[in-house]
Image (cartoon, rainbow, N blue to C red):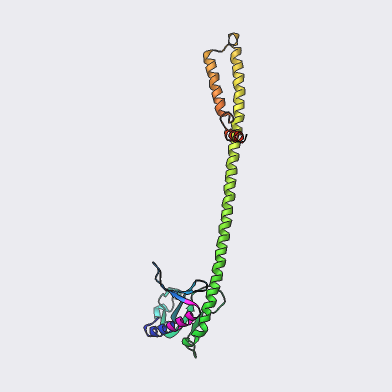
Amino acid sequence: MTRPSIDRALLLLNQLAWLLEGLGFTFKMPEMGESLIKLVFQATGTSIAFLIKEDVERYERELRPDEKDKDPLYIWDRWRYRETGRLRLMISEFHPEGVQKSWGDGKNTRLENKLADAAPGFVVCAQGKHAHDLEWAAQQRRWEEEARLRREAEERKRKEDERRGILFAAAKNWSEAEALKAFRGACEARLRSTTANGVLTKEQDGWLRWVDLVVAEKNPISAGFLRRLEQTDNSAS
């Protein structure tokens, strides 16, 4: 906005404010940490961003002789801009699509005479933005619900995999314990067959007792693998 257009722009804003307030809008002062006044449609609580700006014209400056053979992309300052004095009112919202959001000075009609037609467009945009916000919030909730269900399914799978892993490990330990137990029996039979009257020596007996401890530790059943289920069964009875 150039200085000669500021006073006119302020008058336009004042005129627009009266029109918008009549249509149910209010201007909300900045809250803590904010810097901009908000235009809020009271019926939905939707804020609408807009601006009044001055159109500018872009023209290419006359190139120097040494620049005429250069690629224009490498002449960074070849464009100049001039003020036009033409003002434009713009609603800076994407939603809803396909509705008019820009009004400006024309050849025969100034922006002042278009404000009455432009003001209802703010209502359309506020309602459209509100509808989009509701749909977006609903979509967010759907995504969050899908994510929650996915996390729960992953957690169930993780727990099931962990439970199966414990079971398979226990079964493996039990199988190894049974093999150790059978091996221990074979060892005892061998030792008794090689001593007088089948009586074990103190060392042999101590070693077999140690093997018994190893088997008991290895066997998940004797090591308490089913303790929780046994306690549950006992409490039920």
176 and 222: which one is in front?
Answer: 222
Left/right of residue 4 with respect to residue 107 in the rendered view: left
Residue 133 lies, in percent from the top left, at 54, 68
Image quarter where the N terminus lies is bottom left
Residue 134 lies, in percent from the top left, at 55, 67
220 and 14: which one is in front?
Answer: 14
Residue ID at (60%, 22%): 183
Q: Is residue 204 magenta?
A: no
Left/right of residue 57 with respect to residue 172 in the rendered view: left
Residue 128 appears in which quarter of the rendering?
bottom right
Image quarter where the C terminus lies is top right
Q: Which residues are magenta?
A: 14-25
User: Is residue 93 placed above or below 213 in the rendered structure?
Assistant: below
Residue 37 lies, in percent from the top left, at 42, 74
191 and 206: which one is in front?
Answer: 206
Left/right of residue 110 with respect to residue 167 in the rendered view: left
In the rendered image, the residue lying farthest to the top is: 196
User: Is residue 86 placed above or below 200 in the rendered structure?
Assistant: below
User: Is residue 33 placed above or below 123 in the rendered structure?
Assistant: above
- Residue 95 visible somewhere in the drawing: no
Residue 36 lies, in percent from the top left, at 41, 72
Q: How many marks?
A: 0
- Residue 158 visible somewhere in the drawing: yes
Q: Is residue 19 magenta?
A: yes
In the rendered image, the residue lying farthest to the front is: 237
Q: Which secondary structure is most common in the magenta stretch? A: helix
Residue ID at (39%, 78%): 66
User: Is residue 95 placed above or below 120 in the rendered structure?
Assistant: above
67 and 73: which one is in front?
Answer: 73
